Amino acid sequence: MVKINVGGCSSFVKDADYKVYVEKALAAYDVLQGGQGAGNDFLGWKTLPVDVKEDIISSCEAVRDDWKSLGVNLVLVIGIGGSYLGARCAIEALSHQFVRPEGVPQVVFAGNNLSEEYLAELMDLAKVRNTACIVISKSGTTTEPAVAFRLFKEYIENTYGKAEASRRIVAITDAVKGALKTLSTQEGYRTFIVPDNVGGRFSVLTPVGLLPICVAGFDIRAMLKGAAAEREALLVRGEENAAVKYAAMRNLLHSEYGKAIEIMVTYNPKFTYLSEWWKQLYGESEGKDGKGIFPASVTNTAALHSMGQFIQEGTRVMFETVINIENSNRNVVIGSDEQNLDQLNYLAGKNVEHCNAMAQLGTKLAHIDGGVPQMEVSIERINEENLGAIFYFFEFACGVSAYTLGVNPFNQPGVEAYKKNMFALLRKPGFEAQTEEIMKRVDVKL
Ligand code: PA5
């Protein structure tokens, strides 16, 4: 289960102010739980930990086992935003960082950028591997994954034949509409559904996250169990509710004390993508109507030698939320050296993680002294169960926090602006009028 400690903010905020924001967050909690707030047709994620049926889980496991029988050793997961960040976060957190276990495919991600070099180099890899593909798009029309899928669909069909391609391609999309749904029906792909009432960035506990995580060799039942336990904990209304505390403190720091940037801090590189997932969740959910806290992230201790200077002494506009992992899954002890030229013998006999924990604690004190409030969100260790819990915690807290701020957490109207211009510049049919208009503003030969 997730624990939260807001003690590192106490010297920055007045108790009375915190109490006011706890009340605001409790009111927002009631709106979320009552299903009365803006965007309330997108609340399906709230009950996913207990709603995901056995047949979805066993269908994910069936794909994993089928591809194993084909000898698949590379799985391309094609998707962008909420259609890939949760899976990437879980797979990076749970995987060995350097060694792939025997019999488990490597999972790589595509369709999250339009870089030609990225796609070409990924194709180089696909060509020397036994490749399968999961294509994920709720709308079924997003440009980045559509471009990547067109390339890899053709490659898979040419390499393995049309019939086997329909075994090597699995689609996750809307139940009835969209280009990907139409194509899947036509080609006979196995398909999984993104529920109508679950938005992309809240979809990690649907097949969008579960299938790639399962295919990568991880226990999705344990992940759902952890999420269900966290849901139970968050059902308890009150000022000790972890989501209420988080929502209250971050809104207070922002609205009353001018802290416009929240930095998610991890001391384990395996969690770098947890920050990426969290940045999308909070950035897309809260950054609208001229409001919101800018979500940023650092991975320490590396960043202490780069961004650390700014966080310690730069413009005082930020607070930190540190992901605290109580126990390491490995044990590496620092040895003693007769010559001690590196002068590290004072650490002999200590675990590396002890040094990491002392760096974390020392940084906390330094940053508080430097004017940076700090919260801690803790899990016991990195495993499937705790990842399920942390996913659910941040999703639920996001709903509470956005309603505290007074925005609809479940839409993202701003992402259309770049698309409109890009389509006009690419001369997409239907955008001709905008092309003329935009050509007056840019100096580019089309
Ligand atoms: O959170 C969201 O809704 C977005 O980030 C979407 O997930 C992203 O834009 C991809 O959309 P789609 O799954 O429709 O391709």
Image (spheres, rainbow, N blue to C red):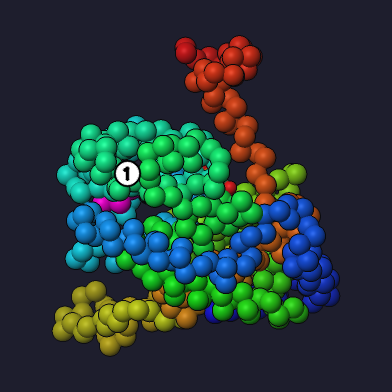
Residue lying farthest to the bottom in this orientation? 349
Along the viewing direction, whichever of 247 and 18 lies nearer the viewer = 247
Q: Residue 103: where, in percent of width, then height?
A: 21, 64
Does mark 1 have its CB less than 8 Å from ligand 1?
no
Judge whether residue 321 can be spotted in this image: no
Residue 372 figure quarter: bottom right
Residue neighbourhood size for the residue with mark 1, other residues' Cα within 10 Å, grouped as few (<14), some (14–19), many (≥20) = some
Judge whether residue 7 can be spotted in this image: yes
Main SS of the magenta segment? strand
Task: Tell me the quadrant of ligand 1.
Answer: top right
Residue ID at (18%, 82%): 337
Magenta-colored span? 74-78
Quarter containing the N terminus: bottom right
Question: Number of labelled discs?
Answer: 1
Q: Is residue 136 one of those drawn in magenta? A: no
Residue ID at (44%, 75%): 222
Q: Residue type at mark 1?
A: Ser
Along the viewing direction, whichever of 230 and 281 lies nearer the viewer = 230
Residue ID at (19%, 66%): 102
Vertical comparison of 39 with 435: above or below:
below
Vertical comparison of 418 with 336: above or below:
above
Label 1 element class: helix
Q: Residue 381: where, in percent of width, then height?
A: 43, 78
Vertical comparison of 176 with 72: above or below:
above
Q: Residue 111: where, in percent of width, then height?
A: 41, 41
Residue 71 figure quarter: bottom left
Q: Is residue 140 left or right of residue 162?
A: right
Residue ID at (51%, 56%): 277
Check disc 1 and report the residue beneath it. Answer: 166
